[in-house]
Amino acid sequence: MNKKEKQGIFRGFVNYFKELGTAITKGDVYVKLSMIFMGAGYTGHKQLIKGLLATLVEIAFIVMCVVYAAPNLAKFGTLGTVEFKQELDPLTLQTTVNDYDNSFTILLHSMIALFLIFCFILFWIANIKTVYRLQLRHQNQDIPGNHINTFGEDVKDMLGKKFHITMLALPTLGVILMNIIPILVLVAIAFTNYDQNHMPPNQLFTWVGFSNFGNLFANSITVSFSYAFRKILGWTLLWAVLATVTTFIGGILLAMLINKETTKVKKLWRTLFVVSIAVPQFVTLLLVRYFFADDGIVNAICNNIGFTGFLKDIGLVGKSLNYIPFLSEEHWTKFMIIVINIWVGVPYQMLIATGVLMNIPVDQVESARLDGATKFQVFTKIMMPYILFIQGPALITDFVKNINNFNVIYLLTNNSYVTPDQAMANAHGKEVDLLVTWLFRLTNEYSNYKMASVIGIIVFIICAVFTILSFTRMIGGGREEDYQ
Amino acid sequence: MRKATKKLAVTMAAALMVSTVSLTGCGGADSNGGGSSAGGSSAGSASSSSVASSGSSEQKAEDPVQNLIKATTETVKLNVWVSEQDQEFAQGLIDSFKAKYPDVTFDITLGAKSEADAKDGVLADVEAAPDVYSFADDQILELVNGGALQEIANTYTYDVKGENLPGSVEAATINGKLYAYPRTADNGYFMYYDKSIFSESDVESLDQMIAVAKEKKKKIGMMVSNAWYLYSFFKGAGLNVDLNEDGVTNSCTWNQAGGTDVAQAIIDLGKSGVFVDVKEDADIPAGVKDGTFAAVVSGVWNADALEKTMKENYAATKLPTFTCGGEQKQMSSFAGFKMMGVNPYSKFVGWAMIFSEFYTNADNQIAAFEAKGIGPANIEAANSEEVKKTPAIAALAKQAAYAVPQRVGANYWDPANTLGKTLISGNPKGTDLQKLLDNAVEGMTAPVK
């Protein structure tokens, strides 16, 4: 983000409230009335249906506040005080349950309520501004372009000139429901003590401030939590870089190989690689995991042809082992995970690279050849920059995806890989864990939701920082002109 | 919204109760204390008296089951979770349960969830979890802490505490309160072996087995880098991991006197070359099939597969003894049970309890053994000749004398896995054994924050 943009955002923010100020100070009686009765402004300017709609929204909001928001927000400060209590009458076998608080539902509904209130405030401000605009139009009625729309005309506009707004409404609503509210709840949980000792609905949890974040960097949650966090973070980043780079380069090389004039039956090769995409990833990975198990088929073959013995001699396999610890020793496992990921990921990259390679300007390549450039020079000076430019955004997405690449790591190492590092084990981590797989096991096996939320936030920050940095570096700065 | 309906349900239930109590109140006052009236402590003896009456036409006002039937006007909706393999069997039981109480309309739905990770599904949202579910007893602590198990203060159709094996009742009891209905007693581990390789006296001690295995070029497999199995060595030598009173954290004596002897014993076993660490359960039948293993430590879940591969050489017995600090120590084990639990958030707790009792009563445990080969927890069923003839279940019974119900908190597992891996692979970094144990114990006993 450059300076100009930053200033733009800031100025926009200021203008937003400045406009509101002007609307309120300079507004006529309708504007002032619409601060309390939201439909008043429209009604005053003869937009009866809109006035009715605005009033309905206001009524709905008030009802929501009383029925939904108020009871939940009242408990938001404590997240509930009444524990679940149930009694079973042994004579009638009927139960009585008290009116208990569920901290999690209180938190969830409070978040939704706060969000709705926030939306309403935005709507309220927009409403005042619109009414003020109506007033201006009304005052300048005689100047053309200041016609006040009827409701029918507005609807027509929404389906015609302003169709983009109508079109965007649904996706925006989806993003809010599926992403924003869960993220808000996740963020909130990071500030509570929601864990296996405080499991709603049976027990209550409450706010604890920043102490969970403190625990992440201090060895107090389990004896070695911060140690595990640092190690896992390091491997996560290394993995994301290696996984992205290897599949990217592998994909390009494979695509070029298939694209070569001398390669025959190109379609067959391409299809063969694409078929591997068609098989669900987890099936492939589980199969591969059995192939490479300590007593799996690959080890049996290596043993028979004497490869295991050779690796033992050069010291890559421990003397006491009679198998290659493909998925049971730290460095071997990391190596294998990356290799297997190349195999799983290259076909996708090949498809993309094929598309890009087909569109490389032939004239540039030919003129370079005429000027005496070697094939290697053509590759590094023309093809690579072109591919990098086109695929830059996709690469960043891949990188972020790899930071969160749950499947490959979890399916290959869950239950079979045991960490030899006691400090790691004490924090329920493994050397080969990514932050996201560690997070999964903390929540799923240890119900440690609060720390999982903290890790989730950290992962989010990492992803966000990398995305912003690389987008501005790779695409910003007007580099588009380079390729014109 | 949800809260409002809940409130309504509560008031309705309360109103119902008042009416039923007042109805039964006058008829009651039986001098011998009313078959199964309140009072948690007398549950065991009190309950058996009501067994007969539930079937008979004679209706006593004190009989809670009859009261329940009378009070039930709406359709009883129960959601039940049992494992994938038990679906058909469970459906049969549901049908006979419905037939047993013809006056009540039931809507019982069956879901499939493995007992091994039932807690993950239940604790994710207890309020929406099934009314009745089957689970392995290793999860009982987390389930009780999460409030997902109804305390069983009284029983109504049979005496759960008295009719089931004491070990299974102990496993279902936390802080003196019974929380589940034992259903099977077959979820622990013991040893399978090949009769053609080892004699009955060989399998008494691990040393002898190793000597024989070396001679015959066979191996003995055990999942040592798995905390669940590693326990058998340390407990066998008299060292403990126990759950603290908070129900979450552990106390552990593995790093005290004798600990290093056990550690050294496991290292020595690993160095023998024939006693090997098995990484995954699936490797056990596979290893036996390809002829690598002549003996494995495992449980009944592998019985069918192993019987098929070993055929007439198939045998099973208790775990052997191992040499620790120059002495022979009998390997211990975790005793494992499967149980039925009732969700206290159920709308029909009463019926859920009656259903669980029905599912786990003597007749149905025998039926389960006959249909699925499940080792019963019911004393009468467990002592039947049929059950005793099954090698795997007989071996479990033999091991039962050395088995302990699993009472460890969540922090035990990962540190102990790693300790097992380090020891069986011969302590590759050469860490001082005492230090190794200290580190592991630090992790196992870490506070949960």
Image (spheres, coloured by chain):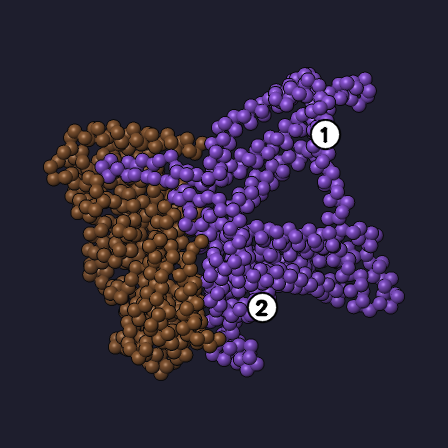
Chain colours: A purple, B brown
Q: What residue did someone put label 2 on?
A: A335
Please identify the quarter of the rendering in which residue A432 is found: bottom right
Q: Amino acid at mark 1?
A: Glu
Q: Quadrant of the N terminus of chain B?
A: top left
- Disc 2 secondary structure class: helix
Q: In the figure, A24 relative to A205: above or below?
A: above
Question: If you read the primary sequence from the N terminus, does the residue marked by circle 2 or circle 1 appear first?
Answer: 1
Question: Rounded to the nearest whole Å, what is the CA distance between mark 2 and mark 1?
Answer: 59 Å
**Chain of the residue that carries numbered disc 2 in the rendered image:** A
**From where the camera sits, is residue B4 visible?**
yes
Residue lying at 27% horizontally and 75% vertically, measured from the top left: B204
Question: As shown in the figure, which amino acid type bears the numbered disc 2?
Answer: Phe
Residue at 62% in and 54% down: A462
Residue closest to the eye, A225 or A367: A225
Does B406 sit above or below residue B78?
below
Which of discs 2 and 1 lies nearer the camera? The answer is 1
The answer, for residue B196, to whether it is visible in the render is no
Circle 1 SS class: helix
Picture disc at residue A19: 1
State the image coordinates of residue B398 (x, y, percent, origin top left): 24, 66
Rendered residue at 77%/59% (across/down): A385
